Image (tube, rainbow, N blue to C red):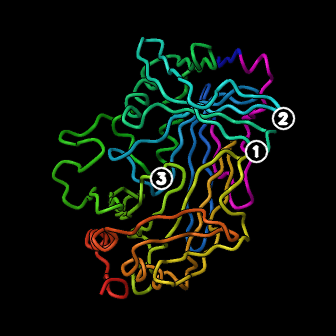
Amino acid sequence: MTKSLWGLVLGLSVAAQPMLASEGRIVEDHAYKDWRAIVLESEGGEETWRDCIAMTGGDGLPVLEVVARQYDAGPPYSFPLVQIREQAPRHYSTLLQEGGRVDFVFDDGDSYSGTAFNDVVEDVFQSGTASPPVEDMLYVLQGMRRAGQLDVSFEGQLLLEASLSGFTAAYGKIAEACEFSTMGVIDPLPEGVELGGDAGDDSDLLFEQFGVWRAQAETFDNGGSWVTECFASIPENTQRTMSFGVNTLEYFPPESYPPLMVSEVIAETAIPMVAKGGLVQFSFDTGLIVPGEVMTDTAHEGTRYIDIAVKSGYRDLALREMDRATALWVYGDGQVIYQTQLDGFRAAYGAIAKVCEFTTDGVLK
């Protein structure tokens, strides 16, 4: 049984049924004892992808969840996000308060600590989230498979008692739906595999920093056929991330060019970087401005996922300018919503082109 003393006192309004924007729809919803596995499908531009969530709680209680997105770099390079999420009713405060310590304690004695973050909109709705450190995510997931209960506390006050009965089945289902490996959590790590970087002697994989860019590649089994995904991102900004990438299921240059995107994950009640239908512009220090658009605006269980991208007819032009320019500003409705230097772009683009075997013609001279 999952309990929350704070949730029982305040009657928090987080519900177990996801609240979705029109672009996202539930395609799978499975119950495994005290856990659920929910799969959402979204479309943007020429792409379709899935968001997969294993969760327990809700219905007036905070939610403990494990979140993954299809085509993201998966195990052993990165593991799904574990987080506690709490939302208060109108004009109430969450127990989770910005900067406070959150402890994740298993009934077998293992424990991990994270930091709470808040989002507030017009001083009306407040939400709070917290996760263990990224470097501990695998060990937390292993504990969730091994233990019987996980207690989550904020500054020593109990927030949630979460049963782990059914977690393994729910995790396996989201791994299947979002096409990432269960290695390290359900299945053992293969001998020689290193976490967070290159995997043994597999020379097809990439994990390297070029200036502000991190270039990565992974190969995964897609229903019996092997697919390689190559992408580069600027990881320094934890709220909004710029990226571009391809996988071998898609068309390559010159038929189609990698989309240049800015993404953010925020509380559902928070104001997005730009609303759907808003004016989006990518502006380079060379003077070139190309139009963008909102590709994704999907909400689920209090969390909102937003991607904006250069419009498809301008992708090659924008990527060529990334090689020429030194700085980029992204505007939403006339306001700067993202800015970055561009050093390392040429090397990062060339690296992923080499691994995914597509031409750099049309982008790099």
Residue 237 numbered mark, or none: 3
Whether tag 1 and tag 3 are in contact, CB under 8 A, the answer is no
What amino acid type is highlighted by mark number 2?
A: Arg
Specify whether residue 16 is painted magenta: yes
From the viewer's perspective, is residue 130 above or below residue 332?
Answer: above
Q: Residue at x 49, y 81 (%)?
A: 315
How many neighbours does mark 1 have within 10 angstroms: few (below 14), some (14-19), or many (20 or more)?
A: few
Quadrant where the image shows the C terminus: bottom left
x then y, percent, for residue 209:
28, 58
Query: Label 1's element?
Result: strand
Report which quarter residue 57 is drawn in: top right
Label 1 to label 3: alpha-carbon separation: 21 Å
Q: Residue at x 79, y 39 (%)?
A: 123
Quadrant where the image shows the N terminus: top right
Whether tag 2 and tag 1 are in contact, CB under 8 A, the answer is no
Give the side of residue 41 with respect to residue 362, left or right: right
Q: Residue at x 30, y 44 (%)?
A: 196
Residue 90 numbered mark, or none: 2
How many neighbours does mark 3 have within 10 angstroms: few (below 14), some (14-19), or many (20 or more)?
A: few
The segment highlighted magenta reads 6-30
What amino acid type is highlighted by mark number 1?
A: Val
First in residue order: circle 2 vs circle 1: 2
What amino acid type is highlighted by mark number 3?
A: Asn
Whether tag 3 and tag 2 are in contact, CB under 8 A, the answer is no
First in residue order: circle 1 vs circle 3: 1
Query: Label 3's element?
Result: loop
